[in-house]
Amino acid sequence: MFTKRLLLILSLCVFGALPAQLNPITDPDDPGFSESCTSIMVGKAASTDGSVITTQSCDQNYRTWLRFEPSKTYQPGDMEPVYWGMLHNEEPHDMRNVEVKGYIPAPAKTYAFMNVAYPCMNEVQLAIGETTTVGKRELVNREGLFLIEELQRIALQRCSTAREAVQLIGRLAQQYGYGDVGECLSIADPHEVWHLEIYGSGPGKPSALWVAQRIPDDHVGVSANVPRIGKVDFNDPKNFMYSSDLKERSQQLGYWDGKEPYVFWKVVSAGTKAYAIREFFILNALAPSLNLNMDGDELPFSVKPDKKVSVQDIIAFYRQTYEGSPYDQMQNLKVTQTVRDSEGNEVTETITSPATSNFMSNDMRNLLNALKPGVVERQRTIAIVACSYSQVIQLRSWLPNEIGGVAYFSFDNPAQSPRFPIYAGTTSLPKSFDVCGQHRYRTDAAIWSFREANRIATVNWARTRGIMEPEQMRLEEKLFSETPALEAKALSLIQEGKTGEAKQLLTSYTHDFAAMCMLKWEDMKATFWGMFARGF
């Protein structure tokens, strides 16, 4: 299919010559298929409650420790370090493979922010999602100072609005140089959300090629590892921002003739389409009235959904494996079995094989296709086993910042793990969140409380999902039924001038809810071992 063919071409033609630090982290169970991260952006008039939403699934082998970093103050003349290598360290203090690439002037004061592999939310309801879009190999200039995660961190520390963040990221990348492969950032505040795509500037003095396009208030957009920005309107500053020498550099590099309409994805992309299966599936599901199809070079940059969407709707997208759709990898894996009906008679029924699932390994797909060529068509689903973490961030203009910004966070595969809330007013996170679980098995790393049960469940997903999925939904329903009262109490405290008490209330709830989720998944792990340890 197109998605697989395109990614194989990209991995061979684009990544082959990249230095090791810039190579994408691929699923060790599925080498060569390097798509990682999905971001969905919802404008305030497209959501059911008027909130703005931005998201990210951080797919593949990125660090899983997270913490809320406090605000800092600096003296005039102070310089702030810019790091390379923060995506894979094991704990916050672990600087063994981290390099100080350079320094920039420090601000007088910074905002507190949620520090994940790709920093995502600050204390004043600025939020950022991320997906890698790669782009042309020759655009990468490793003399540039910034990798994308450092631009995110600095924007969250220094900015209060999405527009400010876009402008700062663009200015820093042009001034000091961008040293990463192509990236998309979905940058949101309680009023608007922007889709920013950024690439290196090629050989010579490092700079950046970047364009940001605003998602209309009544629209939803998607980024899933493919450059998406099409025709740039250089006369519409309300909805477009871009690097100051974008057209000149594009011509100098030979990517634009100066005559044709300026289509950004064609300038920077190493592929032949501006979307793949995930963008199509989400946009088509939200706006079926548009009758979108997979045949053209482009989809709409964003769509007005046929019905307004809720946070729960967006969370549900992150559980998607296209089951029951034409893109279901399981659709041809049917077997017959003999069972007894309610009267005790033997009957034969045809079912989807319980020995496989949409989480099957690459080895299993290869085996099945060797036995019957073409029986499984590889699809890049939204939920994958290789997910490090994901967050769905809701931003609400009618609430104080401490309450209005909330990240519904999940470790590991989002189709299996529960979510818990982390508010913009949070002051601390559980101790186990300080430990990355990617380097080795660690019982003190929060992710392993979920990962172990999730992996055992995939031994026979047909049997375990009837236990795991209802519990996942029960916890989600509990979360959304309890938080309105929690937020009302926190709001009352803030109105009484007791902001510190409100922050502690929100922080305690996060600790308690996360602990409950971890304990439940530890219990589930024991249940699954009991089911499978002696075979089945």
Image (cartoon, rainbow, N blue to C red):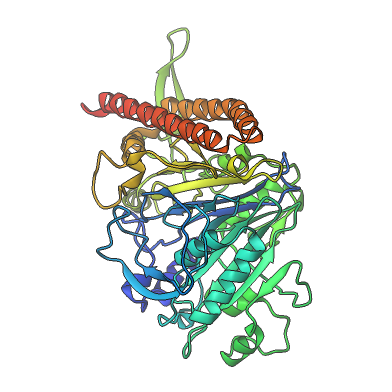
Please indicate, yes or no, whether residue 1 appears anywhere in the rendered image. no
Residue shown at the point (62%, 36%) measured from the top left = 497
Say whether residue 496 is left or right of residue 442: right
Residue shown at the point (69%, 44%) measured from the top left = 51
Nearest the viewer among 229 and 85 is 85
Q: Residue furthest front?
A: 75
Say whether residue 59 is left or right of residue 311: left
What quarter of the picture does the C terminus occupy? top left
- Residue 404: x %, y % from top left: 63, 42
Quadrant in which residue 195 is drawn: bottom right
Q: Residue furthest left?
A: 534
Nearest the viewer among 352 and 209 is 209
**Relative to residue 374, is residue 348 depicted above or below?**
above
Nearest the viewer among 167 and 467 is 167
Say whether residue 469 is left or right of residue 254: left
Quadrant in which residue 442 is drawn: top left
Please indicate, yes or no, whether residue 507 appears anywhere in the rendered image. yes
Nearest the viewer among 416 and 93 is 93
